[in-house]
Image (cartoon, rainbow, N blue to C red):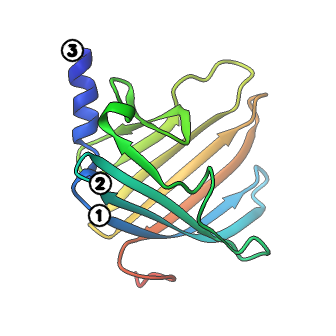
Amino acid sequence: MPVEDLAAAHWRRFVYLKLARRWHALWCRWSPSGELRSVFDAERAFEPTGKGCSMQVVYHYRDERGTVAEGPQSGPWHLTEEACSTPHGMLHPASPEMTTLLLPGGPSAWCMRRSPAGTPCAAELFLHHGDHLRMSAGVVHSADGTLQQLALVREDARGPWPSAA
C-alpha cells in the first residue's frame, strides 16, 4: 500500500471523526511490586468538528489536586488529518513521540514510535466491548528498561461513576 494510503487508512479508522463520546473512567495504577499507587476518575471527551475532532481529558483526583481540566495532560486538543495523520499511525499533539495504531471499529494501541536503548517506553492498548464500554491497559518502562508502572482504565459512556455494568 502506498505511504499516502496508509495515512488515510489510519485517519478513516478514527471513530471519533463521526462519533461524539464522553468516556467516564476509573483509572488504577500499580507499582512493579503490585502496590496500588493511585486511583482516580477521569473523563475523556471526543467531539467531531467536521475537519477532525476535539479531545479533552478532565481528571478528578481524590486528593488536594481535585479536578484538573486544563494543561498539557488535559487539552483541549484539536486533532486534524493534516496535523495528526501519518503512515505510521495517528499522532497526538500532547505526545508527538507516540503514535496511535487504529483498527477497524475502535480498538487501538497508543505506543512509542521508537524506543531506543536508554529511553523510557510506554504503550496502552484500548479494547471495546459494545458501544458503551471500553478498557485500556498500559505499561511504562523506565529508561533503564525496568518496569515502572502498570495501569488499567475502565471506561463507560453511559453516565457518571461508578458505571452500571
The image position of residue 162, as x and y in percent, is 51, 83
Image marks 3 and 2: residues in contact by CB distance under 8 Å: no
Describe residue 30's horizontal placement relative to residue 1 as left or right: right
Q: Quadrant of residue 132?
A: bottom left
The amino acid on which the numbered mark 1 sits, given as a three-letter code, is Ala
Helix, strand or loop under label 2: helix
Do the numbered discs 2 and 1 sit on residues whose CB atoms are within 8 Å? yes
- Is the residue 94 above or below the residue 45 in the image? above
| Residue linked to disc 3 | 2
For residue 20, the mark is 1
Q: Depth-wise, is mark 3 or mark 2 nearer the camera? A: 2
Classify residue 13 as left or right of residue 26: left
Quadrant that contains the N terminus = top left
62 and 116: which one is in front? Answer: 62
For discs 1 and 3, the disc positioned in front in the rendered view: 1
Mark 3 secondary-structure assignment: loop
Q: Position of residue 96 (x, y in %)?
A: 53, 32
Q: What residue is rendered at 64% in x and 64% in y?
A: 28
Residue drawn 60% across and 60% down?
Answer: 70
Instruction: Name the residue beneath numbered marker 2.
Output: 16
For disc 2, the neighbor class at 10 Å (few under 14, some 14 to 19, many from 20) is many
In whole angstroms, how far apart are the C-alphas of marks 2 and 1? 6 Å
Label 3 to label 2: alpha-carbon separation: 25 Å
